[in-house]
Amino acid sequence: MSTDWMNIQFGQGPSGRWYFVSVDGTQHDNVTAVRSFPVASPDEGIALVDVDGKELLWIAHLNQIAEPARSQILTAITQREFMPRILKLHGVSSFVTPSTWDIDTDRGRTSLLLKGEEDIRRLSGTVLLVTDGHGVQFLIRDLAQMDRHSRKLLDRFL
């Protein structure tokens, strides 16, 4: 692996937009960092793309990128992605849909509207993706780690 591209320049300009300087010294403005597999492999398969969606750099794994660019890329991704994790279900308005769920997330307590059971997708044996009525996606990282009450409520919808 060449160390030239490990030491890439990636940062945020005064306007708040992200830029990338390629190995040949060309600066690309309005760059977006995109995860290919945001849930299953968040540190693998990251692309830096320009404003037209053209791939500028493919990063197989984030550990290939030296600091501070790695931290900057993670910050850019975090700004772009919004996927709160559901930590606990306090209650549901109904066991038929549509149903309002009272939940704790890693960003605080809130509620979500589940329009239909099809809005709960099982990504693996323990990972669920719940899409609310407004299109916000909530992640349950490990169903087995949730408390008994939360699992019991979820079982009624799965």
Image: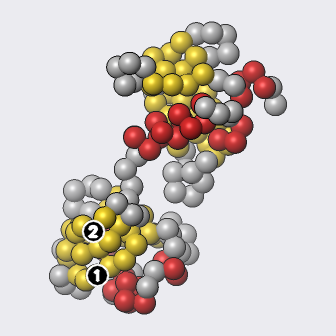
| Three-letter code, disc 2 | Arg
* Residue 109 disc label: 2
Q: Quadrant of residue 139?
A: bottom left
Q: Quadrant of residue 138?
A: bottom left
* Disc 1 to disc 2: CB gap under 8 Å: yes
SS of the residue under disc 2: strand
Residue placed most toward the observer, 4 or 152: 4
Residue 75: percent from the left, percent from the top?
A: 48, 39
Residue 129 in view: no
Q: Is residue 92 left or right of residue 84?
A: left
Residue 142: percent from the left, percent from the top?
A: 51, 73
Residue 65 in view: yes
Real-space Cα distance between discs 1 and 2?
Answer: 10 Å
Q: Residue at x 39, y 24 (%)?
A: 17
Q: Residue at x 63, y 46 (%)?
A: 44
Outermost residue, right direction? 1
Q: Is residue 69 above or below residue 92?
A: above
Q: Residue at x 22, y 61 (%)?
A: 133
Within-10-Å neighbours for mark 1: few <14, some 14–19, many 20+: some
Outermost residue, top direction? 25
Residue 127: percent from the left, percent from the top?
A: 50, 69
Residue placed most toward the observer, 138 or 105: 105
Q: Residue at x 29, y 73 (%)?
A: 103
Q: Which residue is mark 1?
A: 90
- Quadrant where the N terminus is found in the figure: top right
SS of the residue under disc 1: strand
Q: Is residue 125 left or right of residue 87?
A: right
* Badge 1 or badge 2: first in the primary sequence: 1
- Quadrant where the C terminus is found in the figure: bottom left
| Three-letter code, disc 1 | His
Residue 97: percent from the left, percent from the top?
A: 21, 77
